[in-house]
Image (cartoon, coloured by chain):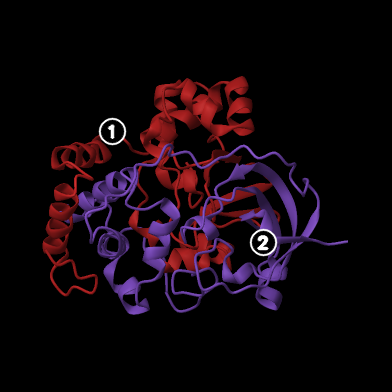
Chain colours: A purple, B red
Amino acid sequence: MNGIHDMGGMHGFGAVDRRLDEALFPEAWQGRVCALAGYAMGAGLANIDAFRHAIERMPPDRYLSDGYYGRWLYALETLARERLDGDTLPERPETGSVTREVDRAPRFAVGDEVRTWNRHPRGHTRLPGYARGRRGVIAEVHPACVYPDTNAAGRGESPEYLYTVGFESPVLWGDEAEAGTTVYIDLFEPYLEALE
Amino acid sequence: MTVDPHGSESPEIRTEAIETLLVKKGLVQSAAVDALVERYEQDIGPLRGARVVAEAWTDPEFRARLLEDGMPAIRELGFGDNTDSHVARLVVKENTDAVHNLVVCTLCSCYPWAVLGLPPAWYKSPAYRSRAVREPRRLLAELGLDLSPDVEVRVWDSSAEVRYMVLPQRPQGTDELGVEELTALVSRDSMIGVERP
């Protein structure tokens, strides 16, 4: 979804301050939320993709004001409300691993030129907005993984090959691009189409 | 118990409420939560990554294996247990005289927990997530790292289940140092790519 979480390239957030909040959990509740989320996911409350999507579904103002673990807390509340209302408990997942064997070869090889699709799904996706409809080159081919777009929505794992795709900075940022810079993004096969 | 996702209660009270619910439903045990928090705070930290870097600086064969495939290599050192089971791969990118690597996650805050522990606040900040892909050189300069225009910048946006760690360059004049002393030189932020050891 085109949400506030998709921050790559946005203006207006100012300087990066490395001095703030050096404690791991400045407030005790943050550590508890971190651990609670880990255990609740492990117990089957939601998969990692549904959890991320629950964060993305927050109202944008809350996303910005609640902070990192505040967003986790919000997502836990959302998922608990949606999934723990009745007596049925979630099933514990068989594996925490995200890689899957598939009986087909990867469609692309290192060096292939590709273009990302220009789609704006309302659900969860891992193609950042700043890289839609852009031309890149396959830099690495990874094993097939659970496909977040379907998995987040409870429509199954439908594993897809994962690629690291390199984008020259001017392709992404035009005249404003910094020279000599390449941005690499990990993208699933359906996001990519071959370029002749 | 009512769990209100738009709650205006304090996060402390909301955390207690959600914990009570998750315990009641049998999804978590409070003692296990206590133990995990303690473990995050004490055991899993950037020290692991620093040790990995020091080994790579002193053992060329380990360095080659690390750059080939990160997870099996860090397991040789006893790291990379199941704290990060939803991660497909750990990829280590080496800084050289010609290439500088920088890691970010623009969509959430994906981070190589297995070697660096939990991410620092600045890594999760909107300022870092928005700017690292658009103007990395300016951002690095603001953070005190001025790169020559001759140095290529590679930014790794961790948008899926691959996690990235930077292998910084070994500082000059450290030829005499052993693994333990070298480990102490490696900062967390140098393994994200925003400073040099």
Dot in front, 2 or 1: 2
Mark 2 chain:
A
| Residue in the image at 13% along x and 71% along y | B9
Have a look at marks 2 and 1 and say if they share a chain: no
Q: Looking at the image, is B187 positioned above or below residue A184?
A: above
Give the amino acid type for the residue marked by disc 1 in the picture: Asp
Residue displayed at 53% across by 50% down: A157
Residue A188 vs A62, above or below: the answer is above
Q: Secondary structure at mark 2?
A: helix
- Please name the residue that numbered disc 2 is placed on: A191
Residue A81 at what x, y percent from top left?
25, 64
Residue visible at 55% across and 40% down in the picture: A99
Q: Position of residue B49 (x, y in %)?
A: 44, 35
- From the top left corner, tell me how far across and down residue A188 is, in percent: 63, 54
Chain under numbered label 1: B
Name the residue beneath numbered marker 1. Answer: B43
Question: In this rendering, is residue B132 above or below A91?
Answer: below
Question: From mark 2 to mark 1, how far is it between C-alphas?
Answer: 38 Å
For residue A180, say whether it is visible: no
Do labels 2 and 1 touch, CB within 8 Å?
no
Q: Amino acid at mark 2?
A: Tyr
Residue sitting at the far right: A196
